[in-house]
Image (spheres, rainbow, N blue to C red):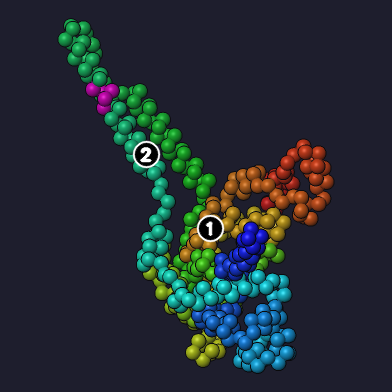
Amino acid sequence: MSVLVLCAGLVLSFSTASAADPGKGKALFQQNCASCHNVHKKLTGPALKGVEERWSDKKLLHQWIHNSTSVVKSGDAYAVALFNEYNKQVMPSFPSFTDEDVDNILAFIQAEGAKEPGGTKGTPGAEGAAGAQESSDNSLVFGIITLILAVVALILMQINSNLNKLAADKDGQAVSEPVPFYKNKAYIALVVMILFIVGGYYTINGAIGLGRQKDYMPEQPIFYSHKVHAGVNQINCQYCHSGAEKSKHAMIPAENVCMNCHKAITEYTGPELFTAEGKKVNGTAEIHKLYDYVGWDPEAGKYSKPGKPIEWTKIHNLPDHVYFNHSQHVVAGKVQCQTCHGEIQNMDEVHQFADLSMGWCVNCHRTTKVQFADNNYYSIFEKLHQDIKDKKIDSVTVEMVGGTECQKCHY
């Protein structure tokens, strides 16, 4: 009996372990499938709700995902019909997917198929209100309180002087009349020094900040939400900004990159959108602004007029004498976009996250540890490699490989 119980437990544990995981399937789906497929809606490929029921054999479905061409060549009626329906466009192969990966994706599709199309929307106005609120800055409040306390202190000092005079008169002691605070040279000198220090502080900070534009958030010709694209839909930054890993500039994507998706996605069904001021945005109308720029007729499904460039306003600017290379940071430095641009995946309207000052860059170079051991870019630094082997150092910062030398960033 004990052996039977043990066997039953093992079988149950194996069956539980092999159960499909919709959570893992969601991640795989968003990384590999979401650019062409939607569960409820036809995009570049068919809607995937009920996909398992449409195939006569689940093994064929697995084979289709691994290599669709082989299934078409086998002569399966449904596969051939699907291939012809989409103008004989070959579905990308995913030979690296295991059967478990495919089952996880199918479990996610089944779970999503049971939900209402469009998903759960956010509470109206909640995101707009949150976006419109800026981080509170209490420095002004503290300044006002300090000024009030200073005035109160001066008044109390004047009252104390007058009381001392009254007490001295009562005792018959000759004491000179107290000097009013606005005529007191000590008070006047103290006020002048305070004003000089405060004025100098703000003057210097203003001069240092000339040309910098932290928190700059211009209004763009089309309301493009990075929160929807990079956050909700998890589109990789480099799909649009393809120059980031191979060029000095990350590049603003051309309109045809937008149309790769928006030929099929003609309406917005995601969470409600709001500007920084809390004004509600019609997402579908913004998509149609894109169509107007590129000359696309969504009803006819073709380009009907000449296009025109979208005049995006550049947000992140550096002085002409500063050299910055995106590819060096992204490829060699393995720096994430959020390090410099902030939580871009949570921004509806992009703003400049950091002041991009020299001090900000230098401090980053002084503290950031590079991926030194497994990065061929740093293979020439033999002494540092030897120091790590000898345990003289445990890591290497950007500063140690010349990251704070003037000529690295200045022509």
Which residue appears at 66% of the width and 87% of the height?
89
Q: Residues within 10 Å of mark 2 (few under 14, many from 20)?
A: few
Q: Give the labeled residue for mark 2.
A: 143
Position of residue 27 relative to residue 340, above or below, is: below
Q: Position of residue 256 (x, y in %)?
A: 60, 79
Q: Position of residue 336 (x, y in %)?
A: 62, 57
Which residue appears at 73% of the width and 90% of the height?
73
Which type of secondary structure does the marked residue at label 1 adopt? loop
Majority SS type along the magenta span = helix
Q: Quadrant of residue 9?
A: bottom right
Which type of secondary structure does the marked residue at label 2 adopt? helix
Query: In this orientation, does residue 11 appear?
Result: yes
Which residue extends farthest left?
Answer: 170
Query: In this orientation, does residue 6 appear?
Result: no
Q: Which numbered disc, 1 or 2, marks the residue that appears first in the sequence? A: 2
Residue 156 highlighted magenta (yes or no): yes
Q: Closer to us: mark 1 or mark 2?
A: 1
Q: Amino acid at mark 1?
A: Glu
Q: Residues within 10 Å of mark 1 (few under 14, many from 20)?
A: some
Residue 87 highlighted magenta (yes or no): no
Q: Amino acid at mark 2?
A: Gly
Q: Give the labeled residue for mark 1.
A: 343
- Using the image as rendered, state which of residue 21 and residue 407 is in the foreground: 21
Looking at the figure, which quarter contains the N terminus?
bottom right
Q: Which mark identifies residue 131?
A: none
Which residue appears at 63% of the width and 91% of the height?
78
Which residue extends farthest top?
Answer: 172
Q: Position of residue 107 (x, y in %)?
A: 57, 73
Q: What are the residue bounds of the magenta stretch?
A: 155-159
Which residue extends farthest front?
Answer: 1
Q: Position of residue 186 (x, y in %)?
A: 35, 23
